[in-house]
Image (tube, rainbow, N blue to C red):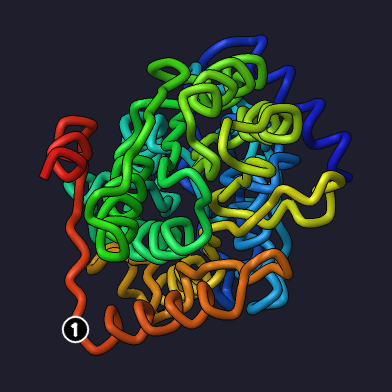
Amino acid sequence: MRDSRMARYGAAVAAGALVLTMAAPAMAQDGVAEIGYISPEDATDFGWNEQGLVGAQAAADSVGGTVIEAAGSGYGDIAPVLNQMVDDGADFVIAQASGYNTQAPAWAAETGIPVVVFDAPDATAPGLVANVSTDAFQGGYLAGVLAANMTSTDTLGLVLSANDVNWHKQAGGFVAGAKSVNPDIAFEQAQIDEFGYGDVDGGNRVTTAVIAAGADIIFGMGNGSSFGMLAAIENNVPEGAEQAWFIDVIGDKTSIDEQGVLLSSVLWDFSGAFEQAVADIDAGTFGEQGYVLDAANGGIGLLQTDHISDEAWAAVEAASAGIADGSIEVPVATSQEEVDALIAG
């Protein structure tokens, strides 16, 4: 089924934009039954694209429904793909990329099919569009506490695949968490490109440079490019350390960590947000509010691996409790300039 559907989506993209002239299909009698899922890259990255699909499947399972998958659809004209989803019966679509924030809401207004988008609260429209955002800075803070407790060189690396607000949020939290442990800790930074999410070679190149500058723990934010970051960490060791370590984001790469360099990952779980979206559609309240992934609702967490010392994990747990009770307020950086200011401060 997946192969045949993906073939149709590929044909739709090749044909160019379609004009939808039919009336929007009625919502399934018992609520959402078919969830459309579209993402720019293949759902094989252990990250954004794959974890989004996992969340979509959980939401479908919660109502006994199914997922119509169109992962790997790129950032071009997605209208043909979305229209094909309508033909396949989709009555709700997850547009898993901030790069879809213009097209997806416009398509929802044209077709009447509700969509969720990311980091676009102004696109919210009752019955049609709801926004998902993340308090990723909370997970970044915990990762920073962990890194500062585990570093041998007192230099940490920040590697970003792209100029992305979620990456900046996590980076800012990471800086604040690390400096809460050691105010004098140093940081080396690198960004692959403006949109280098899937650039594996770029991830390897810039991570290698950051390690060469002395960073022994790399906080890498990348999607597909994270495989290049992982390779660089496996093959390079900074002076003053026995090895380099990787703190990943969104997913869990433990199953492919053959060299034992994955220290942790800031985990994102989309399931709760997507399940609530389905429930709100069924209740007729969709688009009246947005959804947030945070530590309190389980949307954001930190992976515990066997490489983490007991002392370091105790520090992480203490920081987590402080965030929960409000005694720790994590700064929110939404740009590279704000991350730089936190480092300088």
| Residue labelled with disc 1 | 326
Q: Is residue 73 above or below residue 325?
A: above
Q: Is residue 58 above or below residue 79?
A: below
Instruction: Please report the residue visible at 37 percent of the width from the left and 29 percent of the height from the top.
Output: 189
Q: Is residue 288 above or below residue 95?
A: below
- Quarter of the figure with the C terminus: top left
- Seen from the viewer's position, the closer of residues 8 and 169 is 169
- Seen from the viewer's position, the closer of residues 201 and 25 is 201
Please state the horizontal and vertical placement of residue 81, each as a whole percent of the image. 60, 29
Considering every residue shown, the one lying at the far top of the view is 15
Instruction: Please report the residue visible at 35 percent of the width from the left and 34 percent of the height from the top.
Output: 164
- Quarter of the figure with the N terminus: top right
Q: Is residue 308 above or below residue 82?
A: below
Q: Is residue 64 left or right of residue 116?
A: right
Q: Secondary structure at mark 1?
A: loop
Q: Is residue 143 left or right of residue 91?
A: left
Q: Kindly tell me whether residue 157 is visible in this rendering.
A: yes
Please state the horizontal and vertical placement of residue 202, each as a whole percent of the image. 58, 16
Please state the horizontal and vertical placement of residue 99, each as a whole percent of the image. 40, 30
Q: Residue 232, located in which quarter of the rendered image?
A: top right
